[in-house]
Structure formats: structure tokens, C-alpha cells
Amino acid sequence: MKKLVIISTLSLSITAIAILSGCTAQREVAAQKSGAELWAQNCIRCHNIPSPTAYNNDEWETIGLHMRERANMTNEQIGKIVEFLQAAN
Amino acid sequence: MKRFLIISIGILLLGGNSFAQDSKPGRTQFMVRGYGHAGLDYLKTPDGTSLSYVGAAFSPIFIFKQGSRFLFEAELEFQLDQNQLDIGLEYANLMFVINKYLMVRGGKFLLPFGTFMERLHPAWVNRLSSKPLGFGHDGIAPSSGIGIELRGSAPIGGTTINYSVYSTNGPRLKDGSEEPDEAGMLNFENYIDNNINKAIGGRIGYLPLYNSSMELGVSFYTAKVGDKGSVYENVRSTLWAFDFSYVKQISPIKGVLDLKAQYNQTQVSDAYYLELEEDRDTIASYTFDNFSRAYYAQLSYRPSMSGNNFLKNIEFVSRYSKLNTPEGSEWESNADELSFGLNYWISWRQVLKLNYSFINSEGGHDATEGAGKQQSNTLFVQWAIGF
């Protein structure tokens, strides 16, 4: 039980420190990220980066919603990634 | 029944094609995605060796999207096992986007208990041909459940947080009346609620770096697990998982470094179970600290920035995993696994894996009494594709 409390406290502390250290510069960079950057940085967290030509525009819309749910990504991230894939395919 | 299912799937596939042929964009979209794999296993244990072609597994995922907010998805699993075709329903759930920060889903869904079973287990995503010890359908933690869930994510400064909270029917405690050697185990594949109590769980994931390369997650799950009206009615399970992921393309090493880890622990409250003594006439009761844990750490490297076309598709992977089940139980076991792999990526979603695993194990309800520590070595060759 003690171990659990220690691990939980440590995790929450890391989270709190990271939240507090989210500086303005980082915020600006994140907001300005393009769909291509988000595509390269996020898809690779689980699987290889997909080729934009793998699916058509309508299919990317469907996959976008599927991935928003499965990978629990933000509305903004998925929106930008789908826009990029539709433009690049 | 199987014939009916196969015909139904055929009709759905033809339906999917007719949608694809329609060039007009519509509010309704239907897709069939999924994955499959085939392979060869060479297994060497103290009992002997075996060499067998395995797999021929097929997991179609049906996705139906209506408008921009509603999605239904279901995954079937077709797998050959002991000359029989096994068909399973991995998940089937409805999802609705409530707002920018929240989605609701209901039905049978993959549980966000850690990340391995929800995100990383498909054969074309998993870097090795096998799952870590203690993970999967017969693991010490749940992989799916029937219920309802709220989930979402939000940016916080330059970082991202994702969250989930859910309620499901929950697992069932095996009291030993059916399988005495499994007394105290949890059956997570139990989808009919055996009591009024519902399982409650959730996960918080945090991506502290602006480039989303790192994720830290904490998951929680608790439920009463005994049958209603039985002496085990108030037995409760409490599970925790901690997960970590770091994936980044790093220029100095000319490739992608992928580090993943997850720790699961399961605690079931004290209970007395019955066993038949050796004289076959006496029934005795016994108890034990019902605590199990399983964890893994995996490191892979792919020189994706190499100038050599062959080398950039190669991936090196290694994994260590460990499983401990309760001391004093009939299914007490200690096992660890060390695996190495060399993968070749034919495309972004098709891979040829060559893996070798060393597994040391002791105990387990399938083990021969007094067998002691056993080592098994396995060579896997797997060809996997996502579609």
C-alpha cells in the first residue's frame, strides 16, 4: 500500500511540475504546429507513420474519428492531421 | 452459425465496396480495416521440441461513421486453434463526440488499463510476435469490458492530457468449485454481471513534452468480484497500472528510438477457498495473499534516417517481461521472459518479424508438480499486415 501511495504521489508530482512548467513558448509552438508535424509526431507513438496515399479523403475522415477515439487525441490535433492527409494524398 | 457469420461478413464487405465506388462525398461512411498474420513457431521445452506453422489469424474491423460525431466500430477475431476455428468479438462499441474535450462510448470496448491492450497489441503494431507475460486475454488485468465510458483529451499549455473513466460489468472470481486449481483467479472474460456491483476504472495520460514524444499514464480499476449471495459476495479486486512511452526520431543516432513499459498489479481481498485433501475424504480451507503483478519494458530502434534503403527498414527490438502470481495459491507461478527481434518493414503497415524468446518459469496450475524451474526457448517468424 505504501508503495502505491509513493508511486501515485510521484506520478502526480511529475504531472503537476510538468503542467506548471508548460511555458508560454511551448504553448505558442504547440498551437502553431502544422498538420504535417502533428502527423509525424503522433502517429509514430503507436505505429509507423501512415502514407497519405493509403486512403482517400472520405476514408481519412473516418480514420481520423476512429483514431481520435482509440489514441485519445485532441480535437485540434486530429483535425489538423486529417486536413494534412487529405491535402497530401 | 459460423456459415451465417461468414455470409454476413461477405455481404458487409460487398456493401463496403459499393460505398467506396460512390465518388460523391456523403455523411455516412463505412470502412473495413483490420489486420492479419501468419507465421512459424519453433518451441523447445524440457518436454521436447515442436516446429509448426501457426497463425492464419484474421481480425477485420468494421467502422461505420455517421456525420462528424458518431462512430460505431467492431472487431472480430478469426483464429485457428487445435483444428477448430475460433471466432471472437474483440470489441463492438458506439461512440459519440459530446464536445471538443469529451466523447462517450458504450458497448464492448477495449479498456484503457495501461496502453498495451488498447493500443499496442495488434500484430502489425506490436514489435514482437508475442505479448508480454501476464498481458492479453488470459492475463492478470482486463483487456475489454461491457459498459459505458467517458473519454477525451485537452491541451494544457504546450502539453497534452488525456483521460478516461468507465463502468463495466467487471470480472468474476473463480471460487474453485469448477476448477479447484484456479481458486482465487479473476475471470476478465466474464461479460455477464455476477453481482449488482459494477467495476469502475479510469486512466489519466500526460504528454509533458510539446513534441508529444513522451507519455506517462496511471490506470485504476476496482470491482466486487464474488457471486451475489455467495460467501465471496464482498470480495473486492483493486488493480493499478503505470505506463510509460517515449518515441522519437533522433538525428545523432539516425533513427527512431521507441521505449515502452507498463506495470500492472492486481490485489484481491482475503477469502478462504476449499480444497480436497490428499486422502480425498477431507475438505480443508486455505487462504493466501492474492496479489499478482506483471510488467514489461521494451526498447526498439529503427535506423530510419539511414541512406541505405534496406537498412532504414530494419528494426531491432528487445523486451523483458515478468509475471508473479500469488504465493500459496494453487496457480502460484514466477516467470520471466527475454526476447530479441529483428524486423523488416515491407511497408508502413506490413512487417516480417524474426523473434527469439527465452522464458524461465516455475509453477502455474498447468505445471507438473515438483517440476521446478523450466526454461523454454521459442523462435517465431511472423508476417503481419494491417489494412
Image (cartoon, coloured by chain):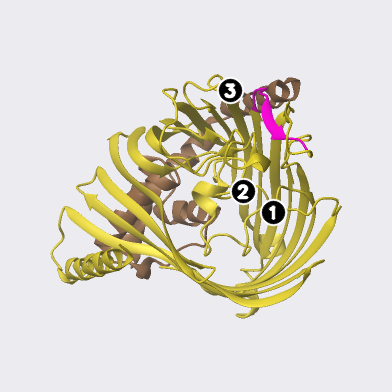
- Where B183 falls versus B303 (above or below)? above
Q: Which residue is mark 3?
A: B235
Image colour assigned to chain B:
yellow
Q: Residue at x 24, y 44 (%)?
A: B70
Image colour assigned to chain A:
brown
- What secondary structure is marked by label 2? loop
The reply to whether callout 1 and callout 3 are in contact (CB within 8 Å) is: no
Residue type at the position of mark 3: Val
Q: Give the Cα separation between the discs numbered 1 and 3.
A: 34 Å
Between disc 2 and disc 1, the foreground one is 2
Q: Residue at x 18, y 54 (%)?
A: B28
Q: Position of residue B178 (x, y in %)?
A: 57, 41
Residue A77 visible somewhere in the drawing: no
Q: Give the Cα separation between the discs numbered 2 and 1.
A: 14 Å
Between disc 1 and disc 3, the foreground one is 3
Q: Which mark sits nearer the N-terminus, 2 or 3?
A: 2
Q: Position of residue B225 (x, y in %)?
A: 53, 28
Q: Chain of mark 2?
A: B
Residue type at the position of mark 2: Phe
Q: Which residue is mark 2?
A: B135
Would you identify the image quadrant in which residue B327 lies? top right
Q: Chain of mark 3?
A: B
Q: Residues within 10 Å of mark 1 (few under 14, many from 20)?
A: many
- What secondary structure is marked by label 3? loop
